[in-house]
Amino acid sequence: MTGVDLMARPATRGRSLLIAALLQWFLFSASSASATAPGLWIEHGPIPAGSAELLQFSDALSKLTEQLRPSVVQVGLLENRDVDRELPKEHPQVPEERPRIGSGFIIHPDGYLITNQHVLGRSGQIEVELFGGERAMATVVGRDARTDLALLKVDLPRPLTALPLGDSDTLKVGELVLAIGNPFGLDHSVTMGVVSRKGRTLNAGGPYDEFIQTDAAINPGNSGGPLLNLRGEVVGINTATVPNRRVGFAIPINRAKTFLPELKEYGKVRWGFLGVSIQELTATLAQALGVEGTKGVLVNGMVPKQAAERAGLRPGDIITGFDGMTIDNVRDLQRKVGRTPIGQTSVVKIIRKGTTEEIPIQVGELPQQTVASVEPPRKDLGFTVETLDQDKAKKFKLKEDEGLVVTDVAKSGPGAQAGLQPGDLIKEVNQQPVSSLEEYRRFLGESMKGKIDLLLIKRGEAVFYVAVRSKG
């Protein structure tokens, strides 16, 4: 057997280590040389003409965002999820119900902050995560579904950094704006864009659904976060987006300023109410009623024992004026009456059987139960959605008694083709949580032929997405 020289190993190991070290030095030297080798790249070249101003702007923008981000928070709803984590085999890729996550921003050092009502839904404990990761429970001071606004408060032993509220009326189309929020849970993300349009209507069905349109990226999770001008002032509250398109919408901050005092004092917005059922005055209806033009709204019903009935309004009356202001359409009347102080006596101008009259009416308060509970079926979608209550929960054998439920699906319509069934619960529309018809309309948006809406459906214990293509 050949002998082995044990004493030779240290020398061999030493030579190997030396060779390895030299090789690493050579590779490092080659890398360093290549890093400065002519013809490969250059570093710190001359600044092109005009770049100095752009660099100054970029630096100023970066400093501004660092000042703004600490006032933006993540708003989470700690829900009791009743979805079985062990998903049935026939739905191997079904997503489980997700807790609501949105954004908000501090408006007062005492801990008052704003978010969207649709972020909160109807129930659950609200947890706010501040910049830096600190968490605190928040209480609801006030909320309103029609305006999609919620005022929250966190109690901490120190003052918080608040954002100043600007003037959304002075915004100009083309003006640069920043959106800060938590898209997809990615905290304190910043995007930039321009104001694309003001007064954009999203067909949400209410008198206060005119928005600032922007191309600053707004995604699920951004809801409730601030839209800011370059002075660092909040000009809007990010609310909605069009899926897969760089189009976002924000509530003008001046609108929020109108309602915040009521949210703080009453916990809700107190809406003026006449107690009439109304519809648009079409050319055909105007001709049948013997009036010229289509300005005004047609009264088609009365709410018993409410202001309009007591004042003597009747079905068939055409309302053309309110407190000296011309009424053009349903939205116009809703807006003017809604913001009239409760108890104020207003003058309603009407046309009754060809004769113009003025009737004094003491404005009442909108009862909570008058909020719409049925969304009329849209021909382009082919299904009916209603607010879920105990009767419907019993009818469809549902465990829940809050939210939205599909009550009817037209045969061969888009809803049926997508697989919708009566009794399906709608949890999200276009990746936005919904719990009311106002939210449903807002995130469904306008009807467009070929438009695809993504719905998150709960059926029994299964939760899954369906895509509904509109017929337009």
Image (tube, grey):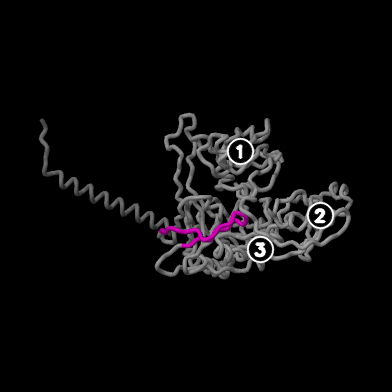
Q: CA distance from mark 1 to mark 2?
A: 35 Å
Among the 4 quarters of the image, the one containing residue 418: top right
Q: CA distance from mark 2 to mark 3?
A: 23 Å
Report crowding for label 3: few under 14, some 14 to 19, many 20 or more residues within 10 A (C-alpha).
some
Tag 1: amino acid: Val
x and y, in percent, of residue 109 in the image? 47, 69
Residue 34 is at least partly visible in this image = yes
Mark 2 / mark 3, whichever is N-terminal: 2
Q: Which mark is residue 146?
A: none
Residue 244 is at least partly visible in this image = no
Among the 4 quarters of the image, the one containing residue 423: top right
Q: Secondary structure at mark 2?
A: strand
Mark 1 / mark 3, whichever is N-terminal: 3
The mark closer to the camera, 2 or 3, is 3
Tag 2: amino acid: Ile
Question: Which residue is denoted by mark 2 in the rendering?
Answer: 318
x and y, in percent, of residue 115 in the image? 54, 58
Task: Please report the residue visible at 69 percent of the width from the left and 63 percent of the height from the top.
Answer: 340
Vertical arrangement, residue 392 with respect to residue 123, above or below:
above
Q: Is residue 306 left or right of residue 68?
A: right
Q: Secondary structure at mark 3?
A: loop
Question: Which residue is denoted by mark 3 in the rendering?
Answer: 342
Tag 3: amino acid: Ile
Report crowding for label 2: few under 14, some 14 to 19, many 20 or more residues within 10 A (C-alpha).
many
x and y, in percent, of residue 128 in the image? 45, 57
Q: Secondary structure at mark 1?
A: strand
Along the line of sight, which residue is nearer the eye, 240 or 284? 284
Q: Magenta stretch mostly in which secondary structure?
A: strand
State the extent of the magenta-drawn residues as a range: 135-153
Question: Which residue is denoted by mark 1 in the rendering?
Answer: 406
Q: Are marks 1 and 2 in contact (CB under 8 Å)?
A: no
